[in-house]
Image: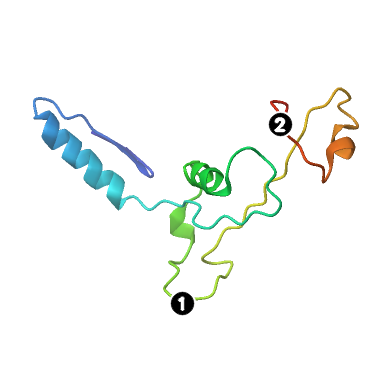
Amino acid sequence: MQQENDELVFELIGCDTSFANALRRILLAEVPTVALEYVYMWNNTSLIHDEVLSHRLGLVPLNIDARLFDTMEEGEDATDRNTVVFQMELTVFGTDQNQSRLLFMNQRITGTRVC
């Protein structure tokens, strides 16, 4: 067994796989994590529906220490102690890298050139 700061490494040798899997699930359930809960979209012109895109964004792992935030209780207002706000900006790669942002700003964009 090795322990360093916030990391614990140990080996399970000679135990049943169902026990190891149950222990893994318990440990994962007890680790505090941060995930996207609400996604607000304005003018989504992509081929992906809002709900599908919101679900996919919720699956993105966020490297944020959950211990730095307070738990948001039911009916409580959002503050800087219990909320993280992300803003996603679209980058379009055109033929001219210097003008691509100006050419496509606030325009309807479709196709495979959106990254």
Mark 2 burial class by Cα count in 10 Å: few <14, some 14-19, many 20+ = few
* Furthest-top residue in this view: 95
From the image, tell me which residue sits under label 2: 114
Instruction: Give how far across and how far down residue 65 sits, in percent.
Output: 47, 51
Q: Residue at x 9, y 29 (%)?
A: 15
Residue that carries the numbered disc 1 in the rendered image: 75
Amino acid bearing label 2: Val
Relative to 32, does residue 76 appear above or below in the rendering? Answer: below
> Nearer the N terminus, badge 1 or badge 2?
1
Given the image, on which type of amino acid does mark 1 rest?
Gly
The vertical placement of 8 against 32, above or below, is above
Quarter of the C terminus within the rendering: top right
Q: Left or right: 29 with respect to 95? A: left
Q: Which quarter of the rendered picture does the N terminus lie within?
A: top left
Viewer-side residue, 87 vs 112: 112
User: Taking 66 as reference, is 4 left or right?
Assistant: left
Classify 10 Å Cα crowding around label 1: few (below 14), some (14-19), many (20 and above): few
Q: CA distance from mark 1 to mark 2?
A: 38 Å
Taking 29 as reference, is 110 left or right? right
